[in-house]
């Protein structure tokens, strides 16, 4: 059934406004077919156990999102959902699927557009071109049932066994493919070949699904630079790439773009021109971080918790100490080798402004853009204690999703960061306990404040992404 919503809107003006609608993709069978020899090519650190990832980890995420965004789908049904061995509530190809209009499954949208014969033919041809399929397979896919075809495009498998091309396991990290900037959608350009098919599928969805019909003029695509096909080499240095983990909508007229391992200077440059030319925002700040797998995107280094509160990796966030306060060896250190972000702020028609350090930028956002009446606070990865700061940043201690201001989701494995949240006055609760309290009425999602919700993470963390990565917000309440 085609998903429709007469009240559907795209409008994101912050990272912390109460979340109302988002796109997600639940772990599919393709994740269970990642082999060790291809894991890093497919951008995973390790192979994962699919059933554990689903039942013991990601399913909690779906249930929690529904309590916050669409409680009628889950309230009073929690026990029956938990007792369903077949997990039909979580499967978009089943009649018992939750089918929320607020927690929207990408696979459902893909199946919807594949019902249209012309779209199905075009998309099959495009996928087969990318994946070098033969002609007979292309014809077979065109004649496949749309619901089944959506699964094939995502998992790479005919039925549950025969693999015809690689899976796209990173589709669970939906944020990287598109970002809502006010009432516009910025469709991104991932850096790695492993994500090309995801990008293609999302473009077809946004330009062809009736849910987005009213926003066609507001869908922006990052263009390639002129004569890009003449650039030498196969590396990412000259490519135009932009991933959603490097884009943050921090206030109604202020966007952050990270230049990282995955987002190029060229990509940021094209995004700035596109957004300014379309009058989408008035201010864009570029945060250039070291091109290292450790960091990958800016949302692995910092995310926002409240109007005046951020979680971040302190070693990348602070300004250099004055030379006279440093040890003698620091006078001889090559400054270019130091791992500090370069931060430059752009306003249309004005001279760029250089910002000294990340903490200064975040403080300015809190105090000036978001008009916080309270002093800006920083919660540090690993409680700023070596080696836990680096260890926990690697397992996404800084990659948190705010479902409302002050209520964020994070992994349960980052113990020192959890201590730092407690020291900053936050309540901490495991998701399983919280769901039971929501179901019994002991707690109410709408009145919950200053809470870190701990999500199980043994398998999810192997994929190198947290809940900020696993969300594409489309609608948030305004903070101002």
Image (spheres, rainbow, N blue to C red):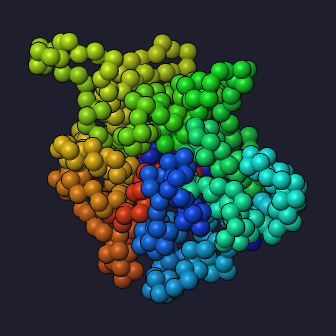
Residue 280 figure quarter: top right
Which residue is located at x 68 percent, y 49 percent?
A: 197
Residue 426 figure quarter: bottom left
Q: Quadrant of the C terminus?
A: top left
Above or below, 287 against 447 in this view is above
Above or below, 80 against 288 in this view is below
Task: Please state the horizontal and vertical placement of residue 55, each as a whole percent of the image.
Answer: 46, 74
Above or below, 195 against 319 in this view is below
User: Number of labelled discs?
Assistant: 0
Q: Quadrant of the N terminus?
A: bottom right
Taking depth in this image into account, of 268 and 360 the one nearest to the observer is 268
Q: Is 153 positioned to the left or the right of 402 in the image?
A: right
Q: Is 329 positioned to the left or the right of 315 in the image?
A: left
Task: Please state the horizontal and vertical placement of residue 236, each as a whole percent of the image.
Answer: 56, 30
Which residue is located at x 54 percent, y 46 percent?
A: 41
Task: Please state the horizontal and vertical placement of residue 136, each as a whole percent of the image.
Answer: 88, 59
**Residue 368 visible here:** no
Above or below, 411 against 263 in this view is below
Which residue is located at x 46 percent, y 44 percent?
A: 14
Which residue is located at x 25 percent, y 34 percent?
A: 315
Task: Please state the horizontal and vertical placement of residue 246, each as a whole percent of the image.
Answer: 48, 38
**Residue 363 visible here:** yes
Q: Tell which residue pokes out farthest to the front in this image.
A: 37
Residue 458 figure quarter: bottom left
Q: Is 329 positioned to the left or the right of 261 in the image?
A: left
Q: Is 227 positioned to the left or the right of 76 in the image?
A: right
């Amino acid at each position: 059934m085609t998903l429709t919503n007469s009240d559907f809107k795209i409008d994101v003006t912050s990272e912390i406004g109460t979340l109302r609608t988002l796109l997600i993709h639940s772990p599919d069978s393709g994740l269970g077919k990642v082999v060790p020899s291809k894991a890093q090519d497919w951008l995973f650190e390790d192979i994962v156990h699919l059933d554990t990832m689903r039942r013991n980890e990601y399913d909690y995420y779906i249930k929690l999102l529904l309590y916050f965004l669409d409680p009628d789908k889950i309230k009073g049904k929690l026990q029956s959902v938990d007792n369903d061995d077949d997990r039909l509530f979580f499967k978009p190809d089943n009649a018992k699927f939750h089918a929320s209009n607020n927690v929207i499954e990408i696979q459902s949208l893909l199946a919807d557009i594949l019902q249209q014969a012309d779209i199905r033919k075009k998309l099959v041809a495009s996928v087969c071109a990318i994946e070098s399929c033969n002609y007979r397979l292309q014809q077979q896919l065109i004649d496949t049932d749309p619901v089944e075809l959506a699964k094939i495009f995502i998992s790479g498998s005919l039925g549950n066994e025969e693999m015809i091309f690689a899976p796209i396991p990173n589709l669970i990290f939906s944020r990287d493919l598109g970002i809502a900037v006010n009432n516009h959608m910025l469709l991104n350009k991932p850096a790695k070949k492993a994500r090309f098919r995801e990008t293609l599928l999302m473009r077809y969805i946004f330009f062809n699904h009736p849910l987005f019909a009213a926003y066609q003029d507001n869908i922006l695509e990052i263009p390639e630079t002129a004569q890009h096909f003449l650039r030498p080499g196969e590396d990412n240095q000259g490519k135009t790439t932009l991933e959603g983990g490097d884009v943050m909508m921090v206030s109604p007229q202020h966007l952050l773009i990270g230049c990282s391992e995955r987002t190029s200077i060229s990509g940021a440059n094209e995004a700035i021109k596109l957004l300014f030319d379309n009058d989408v925002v008035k201010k864009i700040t570029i945060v250039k971080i070291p091109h290292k797998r450790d960091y990958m995107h800016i949302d692995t280094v910092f995310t926002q918790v409240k109007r005046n509160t951020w979680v971040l990796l302190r070693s990348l966030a602070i300004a250099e100490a004055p030379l006279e306060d440093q040890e003698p060896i620091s006078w001889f250190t090559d400054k270019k080798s130091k791992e500090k972000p370069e931060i430059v702020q752009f306003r249309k028609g004005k001279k760029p402004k250089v910002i000294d350090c990340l903490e200064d930028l975040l403080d300015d956002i809190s105090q000036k853009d978001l008009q916080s009446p309270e002093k800006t606070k920083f919660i540090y990865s690993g409680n700023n204690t070596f080696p836990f700061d680096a260890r926990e940043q690697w397992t996404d201690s800084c990659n948190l999703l705010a479902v409302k201001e002050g209520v964020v989701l994070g992994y349960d494995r980052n113990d020192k960061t959890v201590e730092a949240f407690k020291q900053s006055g936050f309540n901490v609760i495991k998701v399983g306990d919280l769901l039971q309290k929501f179901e019994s009425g002991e707690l109410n999602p709408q009145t919950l404040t200053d809470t870190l919700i701990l999500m199980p993470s043994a398998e999810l963390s192997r994929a190198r992404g947290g809940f900020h990565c696993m969300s594409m917000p489309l609608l948030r309440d305004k903070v101002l």
